[in-house]
Amino acid sequence: QSVLTQPPSVSGAPGQKVTISCTGSYSNIGAQYDVHWFQQLPGTAPKLLIYGDTNRPSGVPDRFSGSKSGTSASLAITGLQAEDEADYYCQSYDSSLSGFVFGTGTKVSVL
Amino acid sequence: QVHLVESGGGLVKPGGSLRLSCAGSGFNFNDFYMNWIRQAPGKGLEWLASMTSSGSSIYYADSVRGRFVISRDNTKNLVFLQMDSLRPEDTAVYFCARVYDFWSPIDHWGQGVLVSVSS
């Protein structure tokens, strides 16, 4: 039961920009809890991509960027590359559930 | 180097029980909340349970509260998930993951262990 809503899929040609939205509510993103983003390649565990709304862990290319406004957050991938084909999930904390909430997940395809 | 390694998965009949373990290494286990998260085949991520660093507080998702129990042994750097009254819809890959607190990012995950519930 995902509480954060993402588009099921987005696609783009190599070099283009794609954006993934993550829509929550006033008990999670709207309560100013941090949003984090994960990349998951097939058959592997999720990998932290963006933390604290906008920050990249060491080793994550600056092609990936995050933003947040109100009850929503977004992940942008610029200069899309074939290796970016993966599933992407947003995640936050929800005060009404007293636990983590994940987005529904978005599959990124490189045309 | 941080490592989280799950074990204990397998095939179980509906109504049965299973106990998952997760061994942590390469970090001060006592400093971190430990968590269980699952992913059903072809589906998204679902948070299940969290336990604070000292074990004093526990939190569960509604979907597993009353059936699953999280525990930890800080002397052995282990976290457990006791799963009872298993249902076919509990079939999933189960990940353990560490986080400093609820407001920090999940920065390390185990490789996951498959639990299949079927007759």
Image: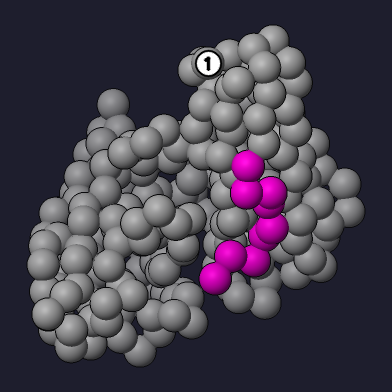
In the rendered view, tell whether residue A83 sits above or below residue B34: above
Q: Amino acid at mark 1?
A: Ala
Chain designation of label 1: A
Q: Residue at x 45, y 37 (%)?
A: A40
**Rendered image coloring scheme:** one colour
Q: Give the total number of marks visible in the rendering.
A: 1
Q: Quadrant of the N terminus of chain A?
A: bottom right
Please tell me which residue lies in front, A33 or B26.
Answer: A33
Q: Quadrant of residue B12?
A: bottom left
Please tell me which residue lies in front, A102 or B92.
Answer: B92
Q: Is residue A8 magenta?
A: yes
Q: Main secondary structure of the magenta part?
A: loop
Q: Quadrant of residue A53?
A: top right
Q: Residue at x 48, y 55 (%)?
A: B44
Q: Quadrant of the C terminus of chain A?
A: top right
Q: Residue at x 49, y 45 (%)?
A: B106
Q: Position of residue A109 (x, y in %)?
A: 57, 29
Density class for disc 1 (Cα within 10 Å; few <14, some 14-19, many ≥20) is few
Secondary structure found at label 1: helix
Q: Position of residue A33 (x, y in %)?
A: 72, 55
In the rendered view, tell whether residue B23 sits above or below residue A52: below
Specify start and end residues of the magenta stretch as a single range: A1-9
Q: Residue furthest right?
A: A70
Residue named by callout 1: A82
Q: Position of residue B5 (x, y in %)?
A: 20, 45
